[in-house]
Image (cartoon, helix red, strand yellow):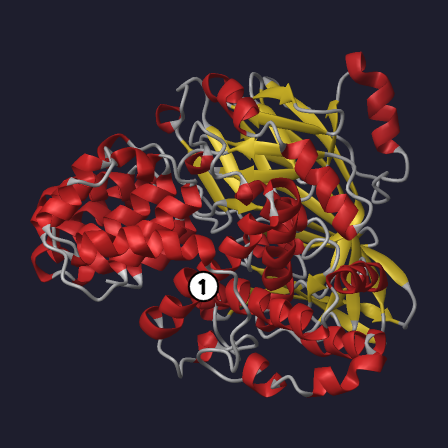
Amino acid sequence: MGVHKDAASFANFDEVSIYHIDLDLKVNFEQKILDGYAVLRMKCHKPTNKVILDSRDLSITDVHFNGDTVPYKAVDHGVLGQSLNIDIPNIDSGKEFDLVVYYCTSPTASALQFVDKELTADKNQPFLYSQCQAIHARSIIPCMDTPAIKQTYNARVQVPKGITCLMSAIGFGKDNRENDAKVKEWHVGGNYRDGLDYIFYDGYDAFLFKQPQRMPSYLFAIVAGDLEKRDISERCAVWAEPSMVDKARWEFEDTEIMLKTAEELLGEYRWGRYDLIVLPPFFPFGGMENPCLTFVTPTIIAGDRSLTNVIAHEIAHSWTGNLVTNANWEHFWLNEGFTVFCERKIMGRIYGEGVRQFENICGWEDRMLPVINETFNPTHEFTKLCPCLNGIDPDDAYSTIPYEKGSALLLVLEQKLGDSARFEQFLRDYIDRFAGQSVVTDDWKQFLYAKYSDKKDVLDSINWNGWLLEAGVPPNTPEFDDETLKDCRHLAKVWTDGTDEEVDNLDPKAFKDLSSDMKVKVLDCIETSGKAFTGERFLKLFKKYDLENCGNCEVIFSFSLIALKSKYKPLVPFMIDFVTRQGRLKYVKPIFNKLFKWDEMRELAIAKFQENVPFMHPITAQVISKMI
């Protein structure tokens, strides 16, 4: 496999690499910074006299090499942050050493969002959470911020009393006498060799963490706030603010079932615990697969467990992404395409194969084709499964392409190879072979050919260049079972083509009894029909199905797109409220984009966005501002 290059990292990880990090940090809510030090345990692969780390807006105060101060210099590189160049004595290949970096983060660190207590659900305590994917770990830790490098970590984090701290690791509780046994257990194998003293701050509690599994930098995660825990099973729990925690516990009741189903499909779960944390509404993503502690948006708490496929997706990441990881962001589909494929396998096993089939066709029609043909265009670099990202912030290339195009390729392979059970065994073998490693597409493809040496003719019939390296729609379409889809299209067609009488005669119950995904599909078929949809017709749709009182954000998003297409002005305040009271990029980006392109509403939308920037996550604010 060798060392894979990463255009988004400045680190000289071909010469030296980090294998473990010890963190000692203090969370300062007043200044909105993290302050402390990182002990980087390193191994040399080639003779060298330098270490280059990734950094972004970090204030470095000192760097020690095996206890001695060494010179360093930060060099700015624009959108990708800074390279931190550290001079060290000559080191031979095979040698190990420690670097200790004393630093604090910036109040504008791209990975962090500090939330004032007034903007939390319960308004009792301020809140902090991180989002390091893709290249934001460098804004909170001086590190080799590339998925090509994996490390274990220990952490000691101090937060004001009354606040609970969690990380993407196993928690060992508080560093105090009452927790003496756990504190001693935490110290085993993780002592700081630099002779550093622990500092205790008045009015603060120190929380201890260990992550014994090697993981890439983008999976570093921290959260701190007024949090309570509810157990789901012996290894699964949910954390949230007190007013939200019981709702979340009910919504995510099936987590242990999903985890067991994933183990049947993919092998033993290797991360110890699987906990969930419900974040404030401005978290940019549906979920983030941080090890031991999946971050989820409150937008998936619909009150009817209809959006828990997000949990299946994040669980699947425990194998595809967290255990076997894309070596750089040009091969992101190895994380997301595999995870979508496995997520739908899990949902199919629990809720029936029809659910999987329906999700597959919706992914192709609603989440891939419009992005290729409308969001980008069929010749755009970012519609390739393996795009070139030289000099590009991976966040700017983010879309559903690696998810849906990647999943579709695996579906085509499963269908052409003709044996689902054998293909699932191949997935398990692939995970076992590359567990703990970072891979590129060629590594996977070579392994595929080795495992299917008896089917080389089938594999050779795949248009690999068309799938992997060419822009636009893939060269062939998977086979889909479209029976459920036909029902959705029929109902949508009444709305787009039917007379007023036919629309008036529709039974509202027929729509309300549909699954969440089917409701969304009906609405998406209306939106993508190409037929004129008047404001009057939209109002009938809105009233008949009581969409105003809908609590399902997927449905809200879909009917908002219809309103935007039909230029239905009365719904604009509703839509602006929707995109300013939560920050999930999946919803916020397309709605703001269409409002910006609506001449009459552009000025209002820009004003509302700018007014809301102080409350938004930095990633969201950056993405939206680039569309103006």
Q: Is residue 69 visible?
A: no
Q: Judge whether 557 appears above or below 328 on screen.
A: above
Residue labelled with disc 1: 399
Q: Residue at x 76, y 17 (%)?
A: 176
**Secondary structure of the residue carrying numbered label 1:** loop
Q: Is residue 312 left or right of residue 63?
A: left
Residue 537 position within the rendered picture, expressed as x and y whole percent measured from the top left:
12, 48
Total labels: the figure holds 1
Q: Residue at x 78, y 46 (%)?
A: 264
Q: Residue at x 84, y 54 (%)?
A: 66
Taking the view exactly as shown, the residue that stands out farthest to the top is 178
Q: Is residue 365 visible?
A: yes
Q: Residue at x 84, y 59 (%)?
A: 432
Q: Quadrant of the N terminus?
A: bottom right
Q: Nearer the viewer, residue 573 or 80?
A: 573
Q: Quadrant of the C terminus?
A: bottom left
Residue 456 position within the rendered picture, expressed as x and y whole percent measured from the top left:
78, 85
Q: What amino acid is labelled 1 in the image?
A: Ser
Quarter of the image for residue 154 reads top right
Q: Nearer the viewer, residue 311 or 208?
A: 311
Q: Judge whether 414 appears above or below 601 on screen.
A: below
Q: Is residue 484 left or right of residue 538?
A: right
Q: Pointer 1: residues within 10 angstroms few (<14), some, or many (20+)?
A: some
Residue 327 position within the rendered picture, expressed as x and y whole percent measured from the top left:
68, 68
Residue 225 position within the rendered picture, expressed as x and y whole percent measured from the top left:
52, 26
Q: Nearer the viewer, residue 126 or 218?
A: 218
